[in-house]
Image: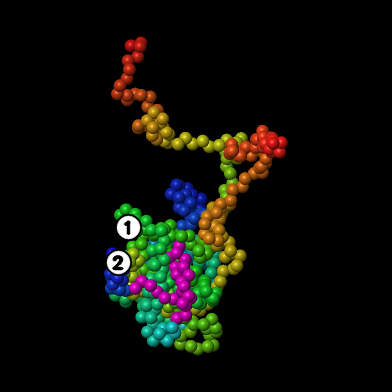
Amino acid sequence: MLKTIKPKNARTKRILKKREPKVEENVKTAIFIRGSTTSQVVNDALSDLCRLRRSNSINFTKKNNIHPFDDDTSLDFYCAKNDSSLFVIGSHSKKRPHNLVFGRMFDGQVLDMIEVGIEKAITMNEIKTPKCSMGMKPLFIFNGELFETSQVHKTFKNMMLDFYRGQTMESINVSGLEYVISITATGSITSSDSTVPSTFDGKIFFRVYTIQMTKSGQKVPRVELEDMGPNYEFKFRRTKFAKEEVYKIATKIPKTLKPKKVKNVGVNEIGDKVGRIHVGRQDLGKLQTRKMKGLKRMSEDNDRTEDWSRKKRKA
Amino acid sequence: MDVSAQLEAQKSQYKSINVEKQVPLQLDLGLLAGFDVNALEENKLKAETDNYLKSYTRDGTQLLINEIFRLPLTSVQDVGVVAELPKIITAIPREKPLPKPKPPTRWERFAKLKGIKKNTKSRLIYDEKRGEWVPRWGYKGANDDGANEWLVPVPDNA
């Protein structure tokens, strides 16, 4: 286990400060590890996925004896040493050919992991098209209702968003929208039952395209896509979901980042902004109002009218 | 002068940017993500996977871009058109737990007890004489005590 370092100079102090928990976090670092045996497919996949994530990702080139589903300690150590919270472990065995395990860490411990097998893979180098400049934020498209219904798919969706979202920005340059990651899920929920052989059940299509914006005669451009790669066909294998309580703590939003509630202002049914003003108790008898001279109650006037009537009767 | 006919002719020259979907896309624009729950055509997927996926994704991306262009856009110098993104809706777990509030230091405890508040003076103050905000001290500051006045009345004792 890593021992806690006491900073001896300003430089190490700065590094430690960068790594400590903050309200608004840094961009997550990802590590790409090779297992005890790997295949060419797995090596290429690891390097391509690393490339897609340009900055903040470390590609280990040496093989490590690591079994994520059995033993967490070596994984915890690598992540703590590199201050990373995302990992991908690639391995290849007869039982699990071309295997990738995507995982996340929280608070130095493994949060959740999903194991996928690569059925088909086409690397970026094989697709001879111009690639986008790296470090751009990608667009995401998730196709298929399984991403709303199935637990595995929902976790995978969350992981992919986490892996490739890049830096959180408040505004984005429209010309910087250069590529889109599209993940399509096919199959039915019952396809997790492996006794049902079917050629097309339970697959995940991972595609990356560059966006070309062309004229459309209007302000919004017409979108055309160009294959960029890498292209994969995944199949889910084992999974390890996060414990409910841990996940709840991990997704807790600090009070400072929560949107502030404005009191006494609301929107009515028509859509107008309505505000409520609280006025204290008022004594209506003592209220200062505008004075209208014509409406003044004259006691002499009343007597005069009475006099007239009396005079009339007399006459 | 009715130019709608000419506009239509011009528009028809280019490909449409409208996309028809049975179930509208759910979006998380903070993450630039779109979630499509429409059913995919299985036979098309089997027969010509790549082309079908490309066209399907193109439709989804078109819808996403349409929505992005509906966000408040500003034109920034040298950069171009910038769209303001809303907050992220999807709950993505953090990597480290929330920071614990640090215990107050010895001075902070004393100040709280005595009611001492920090009173930092701002660098700029409003100079009534000049009628503008100038630095409190320094170059072109407010306290230069007339040393650089160009016209000084001769004092009586001179």
1 or 2: tag closer to the N-terminus? 2
Q: Please state if A64 lies on the left or on the right of A122 as rendered.
A: right
Q: At which x and y percent is residue B4?
A: 31, 68
- Chain letter of mark 1 equals B
Front residue of this view, candidates A251 and B18: B18
Q: At which x and y percent is residue A31?
A: 44, 66
Q: Residues within 10 Å of mark 1 (few under 14, many from 20)?
A: few
| Discs 1, 2 touching: Cβ within 8 Å | no
Front residue of this view, candidates B32 and B14: B14
- Tell me the residue at 37%/74% (across/down): B58
Residue type of the residue flagged with mark 1: Gly
Residue type of the residue flagged with mark 2: Asp
Q: Is residue A155 above or below residue B120?
A: below
- Which mark, by number, is residue A238? none
Q: Please state if A8 lies on the left or on the right of A278 as rendered.
A: left
**Secondary structure state at the residue bearing disc 1:** strand
- Tell me the residue at 36%/68% (across/down): A179
Question: In the rendered image, which residue does mark 1 sit on?
Answer: B80
- Tell me the residue at 32%/58% (across/down): B80
- Magenta residues, start to end: B16-40
- Tell me the residue at 57%/42% (across/down): B105
- Which mark, by number, is residue B2? 2
- From the viewer's perspective, is the residue at label 1 or at label 2 nearer? 2
Asked whether residue B53 appears in the rendered view, the answer is yes
